[in-house]
Amino acid sequence: MTDENKSTNVVWHQGEIGQADREKQAGHKGAVLWFTGLSGSGKSTLADAVEAALYKRGCRTYVLDGDNIRHGLNQNLGFSDEDRTENIRRIGEVTRLFCDAGVIALTAFISPFQSDRDAVRELNGDRFIEVFVNTPIEVCEQRDPKGLYKKARAGEIPEFTGITSPYEAPEAPDIDVRTADQSLEESVQQVVHYLEANGFLSVS
Amino acid sequence: MTDENKSTNVVWHQGEIGQADREKQAGHKGAVLWFTGLSGSGKSTLADAVEAALYKRGCRTYVLDGDNIRHGLNQNLGFSDEDRTENIRRIGEVTRLFCDAGVIALTAFISPFQSDRDAVRELNGDRFIEVFVNTPIEVCEQRDPKGLYKKARAGEIPEFTGITSPYEAPEAPDIDVRTADQSLEESVQQVVHYLEANGFLSVS
């Protein structure tokens, strides 16, 4: 859409509004911040904190996490390998829609398999940012905010990532966040600086 | 989030950003404009035109339609009754996420069954606006933009809504748009006026 079109009253005759138009309106690019890491690594805490920091700057953001996905879009999926892959596939497709809408989508899921994460990167191209919430399992297990490691060690959770099910650490994450070595503020700034340095927070 | 929180540098310690925060930033409410009607009724044309009009007013919008859903999120669904219902269910869940994100989501799907549409209304509560694109089938068949009625009449499409498969017209649509009796601009204004009159285009 050109400026000329916008100045008339019949803008709706001029065709669809596209991603570039929505990004221009937002003042930043659509993007996908894909936080991956073990249970207890701090994915949701960091995603929420990054969202708050971006909100404060006027950015359009949305966090996808277990709370709004598992009991909604993906309520008909279980925990088989097939369902886990479909879980991540659907979330990936939703991030693509948000990105197209000019929103910075942040996701907080363990997403243990590199192939699943790569498929989402494939969908989103250079808008996809893999954020490895790189917290040692010893630290995660010590934090154990939901008591899940304790249950897993007691054999009460059959397939638990990092204990009885593999976690494939990102081979080449775009951002590697060591939450055990720095404060939450420092981790937030690391992510925000990445966005700034890579041109996501402005439109050309 | 209070104004006090926003004035500090540690906003990310104050908890999550919620729908109300995002709507305040957007200057309008999140909403779901659910366009339903026969093939050729003008759902996509109207949804795109309403999006353009809202964009021009600075609103955050996104159109979900066959182009970005059928080959993406719902690529693993066919056309059985079960799959059609799952198709609409997933779209409904995605509209809920966009609405929560403070976006006005517009959908353009035939969505022939009242029960499927009611389920989406249930999800979205008073943010759901059922827009009946109420174009007589004779007019739709005359327009036949994709040549589908011709194929359906020739028996080349086994289950075609309005011909060999039922279309359940909305029992109590929030907006009833008679596209055969008024111009596209008039239809757009009808929808936009509904949003204005019902307080969707401002935040309280």
Image: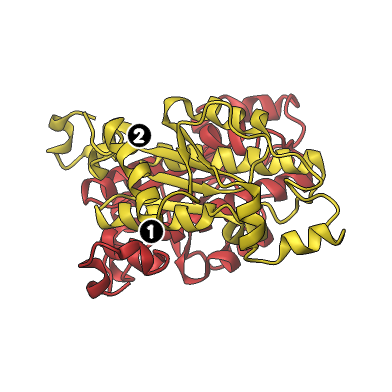
Chain colours: A red, B yellow
Instruction: Where is residue A80? Give x, y as percent.
Output: 79, 41
* CA–CA distance in space, label 1 to label 2: 17 Å
Q: Position of residue B102 (x, y in %)?
A: 35, 41
Q: Is residue B119 left or right of residue B45?
A: right
- Image quarter hosting the C terminus of chain B: top left
Label 2 secondary element: helix
Q: Is residue A132 visible?
A: no
| Residue drawn 20% across the image and 67% down it | A7
What numbered label is drawn on residue A102? Answer: 1
Answer few, some or many: residues within 10 Å of disc 1's Cα (few below 14, many 20 plus, some between 14 and 19).
many
**Residue that appears at 38% across and 40% down:** A48
- Up-down relation of residue B24 to residue B79 (above or below): above
In the rendering, which numbered label is found on residue A33? Answer: none
Question: Can the viewer see residue B174?
Answer: yes
Q: Is residue B6 above or below residue A129?
A: above
Circles 1 and 2 on the same chain: no
Residue at 67% from the left image edge and 55% from the top image edge: A113
B96 vs B111, left or right, is left
Residue B19 bears which disc, if any?
A: 2
Q: How many marks?
A: 2
Q: Quick check: marks 1 and 2 in contact, CB under 8 Å?
A: no
Secondary structure, mark 1, is loop
Question: Disc 2 residue type?
Answer: Gln
Amino acid at dot 1: Gly
x and y percentages locating residue A146 in the rendered image: 54, 26
- Image x and y of residue A71, in percent: 60, 30
